[in-house]
Image (cartoon, rainbow, N blue to C red):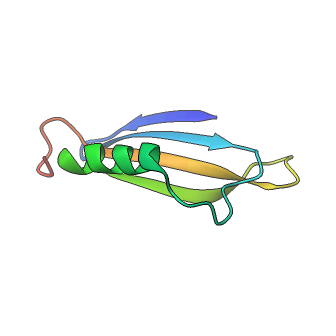
Amino acid sequence: MVAVELDGEHASVGITDDGVGMGAAAEGNGIGGMRERLGTHGGMLEITPAWVPGSPTLGTRIVAWLPAPGSQHV
Protein backbone atom coordinates (compact mmCIF):
# COMPACT_ATOMS: atom_id res chain seq x y z
CA MET A 1 0.00 0.00 0.00
CA VAL A 2 1.24 3.50 -0.85
CA ALA A 3 -0.10 6.61 0.88
CA VAL A 4 0.68 10.25 0.08
CA GLU A 5 -0.42 12.96 2.50
CA LEU A 6 -0.07 16.73 2.58
CA ASP A 7 -1.24 19.00 5.36
CA GLY A 8 -0.22 22.53 6.29
CA GLU A 9 2.93 21.37 8.05
CA HIS A 10 4.24 18.21 6.37
CA ALA A 11 4.24 16.17 3.20
CA SER A 12 4.68 12.42 3.57
CA VAL A 13 4.93 9.31 1.45
CA GLY A 14 4.37 5.97 3.16
CA ILE A 15 4.83 2.47 1.84
CA THR A 16 3.54 -0.57 3.72
CA ASP A 17 4.10 -4.17 2.69
CA ASP A 18 2.86 -7.47 4.08
CA GLY A 19 6.17 -9.28 3.77
CA VAL A 20 8.25 -10.80 6.53
CA GLY A 21 9.57 -7.49 7.90
CA MET A 22 13.15 -6.38 8.32
CA GLY A 23 13.89 -8.16 11.59
CA ALA A 24 17.32 -7.25 12.90
CA ALA A 25 18.67 -6.36 9.46
CA ALA A 26 21.25 -3.59 9.46
CA GLU A 27 20.58 -0.47 7.42
CA GLY A 28 22.61 -0.30 4.25
CA ASN A 29 23.78 2.62 2.16
CA GLY A 30 20.38 2.98 0.46
CA ILE A 31 18.41 3.65 3.64
CA GLY A 32 21.23 5.72 5.12
CA GLY A 33 21.36 7.78 1.93
CA MET A 34 17.60 8.38 2.05
CA ARG A 35 17.85 9.50 5.70
CA GLU A 36 20.70 11.85 4.83
CA ARG A 37 18.92 13.42 1.85
CA LEU A 38 15.67 13.91 3.76
CA GLY A 39 17.55 15.35 6.75
CA THR A 40 19.26 17.88 4.49
CA HIS A 41 15.80 19.26 3.69
CA GLY A 42 14.44 19.16 7.25
CA GLY A 43 12.75 15.79 6.85
CA MET A 44 13.11 12.32 8.30
CA LEU A 45 12.68 8.66 7.45
CA GLU A 46 10.76 6.33 9.75
CA ILE A 47 10.86 2.52 9.44
CA THR A 48 8.56 0.44 11.65
CA PRO A 49 6.96 -3.01 11.70
CA ALA A 50 3.49 -2.99 10.16
CA TRP A 51 0.51 -5.26 10.56
CA VAL A 52 -1.52 -5.60 7.38
CA PRO A 53 -5.04 -7.05 7.76
CA GLY A 54 -5.19 -10.59 6.42
CA SER A 55 -1.42 -11.10 6.55
CA PRO A 56 -0.08 -13.79 8.91
CA THR A 57 3.20 -11.90 9.42
CA LEU A 58 4.37 -8.40 10.28
CA GLY A 59 5.46 -6.42 7.27
CA THR A 60 7.36 -3.14 7.08
CA ARG A 61 6.21 0.47 6.89
CA ILE A 62 8.53 3.16 5.56
CA VAL A 63 7.46 6.81 5.77
CA ALA A 64 9.38 9.79 4.39
CA TRP A 65 8.40 13.15 5.94
CA LEU A 66 9.30 16.59 4.61
CA PRO A 67 8.18 20.05 5.70
CA ALA A 68 5.33 21.26 3.49
CA PRO A 69 6.15 24.09 1.10
CA GLY A 70 5.62 27.40 2.87
CA SER A 71 5.43 25.85 6.38
CA GLN A 72 7.38 27.24 9.33
CA HIS A 73 9.42 24.02 9.45
CA VAL A 74 11.35 24.61 6.25
Quadrant including the N terminus: top right
- Residue projecting furthest to the bottom: 24
Quarter occupied by residue 25: bottom right
Residue 72 in the image: x percent, y percent? 11, 50
- Residue projecting furthest to the front: 29
**Residue at image coords 28%, 49%:** 36
**Residue at image coords 13%, 46%:** 74
Q: Which of 49 and 11 is in front in this view?
A: 49
Left or right: residue 63 compared with residue 61: left
Q: Which of 57 and 1 is in front in this view?
A: 57
Q: Nearer the viewer, residue 15 or 7?
A: 15
Left or right: residue 62 compared with residue 45: right
Left or right: residue 21 compared with residue 48: right
Q: Which of 28 and 66 is in front in this view?
A: 28
Residue 23 in the image: x percent, y percent? 68, 63
How many marks the image carries: the answer is 0
Quarter occupied by residue 34: top left
**Residue at image coords 23%, 39%:** 68
Q: Is any atom of residue 66 visible in this view? A: yes
Q: Is any atom of residue 42 visible in this view? A: no
Residue 35 in the image: x percent, y percent? 35, 50
Quarter occupied by residue 37: top left
